[in-house]
Image (cartoon, grey):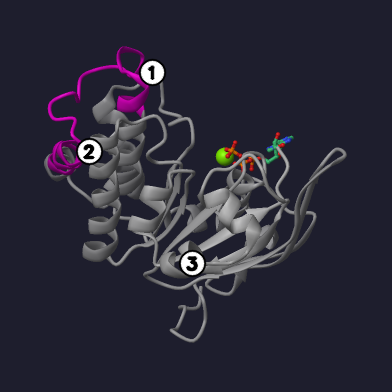
Amino acid sequence: MEKATNSHPLISFENVYKTFGNLKVLNGLNFTVNKGETLVIIGQSGTGKSVTLRCLLGLIIPDKGKVLFQGNNIPDMNEQELINLRSNFGMLFQMAALFDSMTVGENVAFPIMAKGEKPLDETNNIVTETLRAVGLTGIEHKMPAELSGGMKKRVGLARAVASNPNVILYDEPTTGLDPITADAINELIISTQKQMKTTSIVVTHDMTSAYKVADRMIMLHQGVVVGSGTPDEIRNSDDPMIQQFINGRADGPIEI
Ligand SMILES: Nc1ncnc2c1ncn2[C@@H]1O[C@H](COP(=O)(O)OP(=O)(O)OP(=O)(O)O)[C@@H](O)[C@H]1O
Ligand SMILES: [Mg+2]
């Protein structure tokens, strides 16, 4: 694969459409993500944020349009190319999606082992350290069923970052967490990006988290981008749709 240069975005969605049955979800979606930046995606429930992330992993194939990673179109990739593509990505799924039959430690180790580059003792050290970073020291031997929802989410987060991927996709990383733990997760997202030069996409409804972790933000509505900018530009936007969303008002141009 050709390397992305500064003048080319690492990721671009070009006029992407996706319909499920009669439901039009993505309606000509366009956005780019530059190498090393954190892009936050906000938008109402059901507007296509998780579908967008799944398009990037090649788990959903759009009806029309391009999803480019390093200039290569993901919908055109064969199975082997998709396996290579996915080795670049860490993903925190919205519902954590842990492997239920594996221990916490095995879950976090999984993407490191899949890369096959690290000896076992080093892998174990990374697992211990990553679990510490998400505030879960010493739970390697627990099974997912023994954990609370917030703990599962944090194990999913540890699994997403443990293998030091080039790109991390976070689907609602702080939802359902208490405010203190949520802020620790924000710090982890920021420090991972800084230390590892990771490129990140964060889908969130949590505006405190969005403003804190974002270099740039986009707002989706009905499968298109309706606003974009830095956290300050979004905060100060005079677009009524953006103001309604960021201030959490039922009343306004966006209908529930
Ligand atoms: N595989 C699928 N088959 C059919 N419909 C789907 C599928 N995946 C998503 N959808 C539908 O597409 C729409 C967008 O879903 P998506 O999960 O992207 O929403 P979202 O923006 O992530 O919402 P939330 O904030 O609630 O997570 C929803 O109406 C959903 O039911
Ligand atoms: Mg979602």
Q: Which residues are magenta?
A: 125-152
Q: Which mark is residue 84?
A: none
Q: Which mark is residue 101?
A: 1
**Residue furthest out toward the front:** 251
Q: Along the horizontal axis of the image, is 181 left or right of 35?
A: left
Say which quadrant the C terminus sits in. Answer: top right
For label 2, the residue is 134
Task: Confirm whether residue 12 shows in the render.
Answer: no
Q: Give the alpha-carbon distance from disc 3 to disc 1, as whole Å.
A: 47 Å
- Cβ atoms under marks 2 and 1 closer than 8 Å: no
Residue 186 vs 136, above or below: the answer is below
The residue tagged with tag 1: helix, strand or loop?
Answer: loop
**Residue furthest out toward the top:** 146
Residue 24 x/y as whole percent: 81, 47
**Residue furthest out toward the bottom:** 7
- Cβ atoms under marks 2 and 3 closer than 8 Å: no
Mark 1 residue CB less than 8 A from any atom of ligand 1:
no
Q: Residues within 10 Å of mark 2 (few under 14, many from 20)?
A: many
Q: Along the horizontal axis of the image, is 43 left or right of 199?
A: right
Mark 2 or mark 3, earlier in chain:
2
For label 3, the residue is 236
Mark 3 or mark 1, earlier in chain:
1
Q: Is residue 68 magenta?
A: no
The residue tagged with tag 2: helix, strand or loop?
Answer: loop
Task: Confirm whether residue 237 shows in the render.
Answer: yes
Single out the mark in the foreground, 2 or 1: 2
